[in-house]
């Protein structure tokens, strides 16, 4: 049974469609990341799951049961916001305790002095204190319990925000760009901590981000969203290696994939005089778009079949050098990944020969942007099936 299921969810703001019939199932204990550019509708989708927004059409199910009639409090999901949403006048302890006080105490029992007259208040207060301290120890923020959020670092505030969600022990965690306010170095560290937290808890995580690095490194599955539609939902590796749509191939991967227009010849594809590896079931002269990742290309000697061009930019990333080459086969420079000892010998203005690696079958997209399977892929699916 899916922990969270969306069935044909649509959301309109006035005459603008923000979500277009989105269907998605998240299994219990899964870490699923919804990734896409700003404004694609991913945060709206998360708010609909939490009950903070009402969809125009469609259905939300939690643990297999319809949840559209449930208020946010009754859905037993915890939301972690981009802004952390901590109360600056409360200590870390009180920020963590607040969700439990709201759930476990009546309005009268929550009063500062009157509430203490109730015997049950003392019992519940001890339960709350135990839960808060256990959560703080788990997140290694016990030493911060007496402090207020203001002086804390970004990473510490992020842990407090996670703790406030975790202390309730919800069925699912919904995270809306929780690392976007952190610097680059701390984001990498927090990615590791979130992935480790997920493994320890075994809880369901639905994570929203525009950062593909976060999506690809933490998730069991990635859902790529653009213009209010889910274009591809699969493992990070599959989304990168076999994207279903050209838009997904362009969005996932850094540097971006090289896209080249080409025509088919007897089931094969020739680009600038170079015949690419692979066979496809496509008609002769059909116009297609070929996608070549930077690692699927290499700088080769002039005698090797390839595309000659001029080096217009070099990106030294330490472990790799990305060589940008302007050639006649593409309107944009082609990006090639090479080793540092090769890249260090190149200079801007050099003429080089770029060639596709023969062992790499390129991605091929049809006129509507859909990826076309090669005959080898079709045969493999038939044999494995």
Image (cartoon, rainbow, N blue to C red):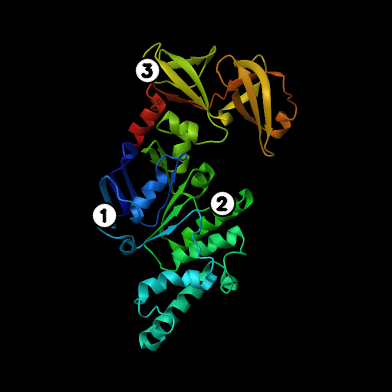
Circle 2 or circle 3, nearest the eye: 2
Question: Which is more N-terminal, label 3 or label 2?
Answer: 2
| Mark 3 closeness class: few <14, some 14–19, many ≥20 residues within 10 Å | many
Q: Residue 4: image x %, image y %?
A: 32, 53
Q: Residue 169: image x %, image y %?
A: 40, 67
Q: Which residue is mark 2?
A: 181
Mark number displayed over residue 282: 3
Circle 1 or circle 3, nearest the eye: 1
Q: Is residue 134 visible?
A: no
Q: Residue 56: image x %, image y %?
A: 27, 45
Q: Which residue is mark 1?
A: 68
- The quadrant of the rendering that contains the N terminus is bottom left
Front position in the image: 98 or 5: 98
Label 2 with label 3: CB-CB less than 8 Å: no
Q: Is residue 244 above or below residue 69?
A: above
For the point 36% across and 75% down, the residue is 104
| Mark 1 closeness class: few <14, some 14–19, many ≥20 residues within 10 Å | some
Question: Which is more N-terminal, label 1 or label 2?
Answer: 1
Residue 146 image-quadrant placement:
bottom right
Q: Residue 116: image x %, image y %?
A: 41, 86
Q: CA distance from mark 1 to mark 3?
A: 46 Å
Q: Is residue 101 visible?
A: yes
| Mark 2 closeness class: few <14, some 14–19, many ≥20 residues within 10 Å | some
């Amino acid at each position: 049974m899916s922990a969270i299921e969306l069935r044909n969810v649509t959301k309109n703001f006035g005459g603008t469609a923000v979500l277009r019939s989105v269907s998605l199932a998240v299994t219990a204990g899964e870490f699923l990341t919804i990734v896409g550019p700003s404004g694609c509708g991913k945060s709206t989708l998360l708010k609909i799951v939490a009950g903070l927004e009402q969809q125009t059409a469609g259905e939300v199910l939690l643990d297999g049961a319809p949840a559209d009639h449930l208020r946010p409090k009754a859905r037993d999901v915890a939301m972690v916001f981009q802004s952390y949403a901590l109360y600056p006048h409360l200590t870390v302890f009180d920020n963590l305790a607040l969700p439990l006080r709201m759930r476990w105490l009546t309005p009268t029992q929550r009063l500062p002095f009157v509430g203490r007259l109730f015997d049950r208040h003392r019992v519940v207060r001890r339960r709350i204190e135990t839960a808060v301290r256990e959560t703080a120890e788990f997140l290694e923020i016990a030493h911060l319990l007496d402090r207020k959020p203001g002086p804390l670092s970004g990473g510490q505030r992020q842990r407090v925000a996670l703790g406030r969600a975790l202390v309730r022990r919800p069925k699912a965690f919904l995270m809306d760009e929780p690392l976007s306010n952190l610097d680059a170095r701390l984001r990498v560290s927090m990615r590791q901590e979130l992935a480790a937290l997920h493994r320890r808890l075994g809880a369901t995580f639905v994570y929203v981000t525009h950062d593909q690095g976060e999506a690809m490194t933490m998730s069991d599955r990635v859902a790529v969203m653009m213009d209010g539609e889910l274009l591809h939902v699969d493992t990070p590796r599959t989304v990168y290696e076999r994207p279903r749509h050209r838009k997904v191939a362009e969005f996932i991967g850094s540097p971006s994939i090289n896209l080249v227009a080409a025509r088919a010849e007897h089931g094969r594809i020739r680009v600038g005089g170079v015949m690419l590896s692979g066979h496809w079931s496509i008609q002769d002269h059909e116009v297609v778009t070929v996608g070549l990742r930077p690692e699927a290309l290499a700088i080769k000697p002039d005698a090797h079949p390839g595309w000659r061009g001029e080096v217009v930019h070099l990106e030294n990333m330490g472990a790799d050098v990305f060589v940008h080459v302007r050639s006649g086969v593409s309107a944009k420079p082609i990006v090639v990944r090479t080793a540092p000892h090769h890249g260090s010998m190149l200079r801007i203005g050099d003429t080089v020969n770029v060639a596709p690696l023969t062992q790499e079958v390129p991605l091929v997209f049809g006129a509507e942007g859909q990826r076309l399977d090669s005959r080898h892929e079709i045969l493999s699916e038939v044999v494995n099936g």
